[in-house]
Amino acid sequence: MRHKRLWKVLIILFVVLGVGGKLLYDRLYDNLENLEAMEIQEVDLAAVEDGRYVGFYGSFPVDAKVEVIVTDHRIMKISLLEHGNGQGGNAEVIPDKVVEAQSLQIDSVSGATYSSRVILKAIEVALESEKQP
């Protein structure tokens, strides 16, 4: 009698874990597809005042928070404050590439596409936000 009850509990547990795992996988897959298709808008630096701007963007399983310093309508420095990246650590060169190009229209880092796109979107969000005190 006890063994039947144990088997029922184990079967229910495996079913719940299986369904939960499938839902998580589907959500992850959708998020990663959306990241690849997401457009990164160019920001008109002529319209950005001097100052410090902070932006965050996240899409499970990747997120980034940046600080952007603008002087004379040029991006002087971008600090990557947070980067939840999984395997996308190589994308942490993106801020330097943006400063060099003075543009968000740069190539993603090979093997770190999702992190590259999230960092670029966080920079876009920062430059479109209000200046920080």
Image: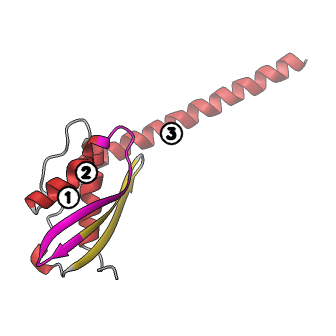
Q: Residues within 10 Å of mark 2 (few under 14, many from 20)?
A: many
Q: Please name the amino acid that badge 1 sits on.
A: Ile
The percent position of residue 35, horizontal first and vertical second, equals 29, 48
Image height check: is 50 above or below 37? below
Q: Please name the amino acid that badge 3 sits on.
A: Leu
Image height check: is 54 above or below 79? below
Please state which of the two labelled residues, at mark 2 or mark 3, is closer to the viewer.
2
- Sequence-wise first label, 2 or 3: 3
Q: Secondary structure at mark 1?
A: loop
The percent position of residue 41, horizontal first and vertical second, equals 17, 63
Q: Please name the amino acid that badge 2 sits on.
A: Arg
Q: Magenta stretch: give its range.
A: 69-89
Q: Secondary structure at mark 2?
A: helix
The percent position of residue 89, horizontal first and vertical second, equals 32, 42
Distance from label 3 to label 1 (Cα)?
28 Å
Find disc 1 in the rendering and name its residue: 40
Distance from label 2 to label 3 (Cα)?
24 Å
Find disc 2 in the rendering and name its residue: 117
Asked whether the viewer can see residue 9, the reply is yes
Q: Quadrant of residue 109?
A: top left
Q: Residues within 10 Å of mark 1 (few under 14, many from 20)?
A: some
Q: Quadrant of residue 130?
A: bottom left
Residue at coordinates 12% horizontally, 52% vertically from top-left? 106
Please state which of the two labelled residues, at mark 3 or mark 1, is closer to the viewer.
1
**Disc 2 and disc 1 in contact, CB within 8 angstroms:** yes
Residue at coordinates 45% horizontally, 36% vertically from top-left? 25
Which image quarter holds the C terminus? bottom left
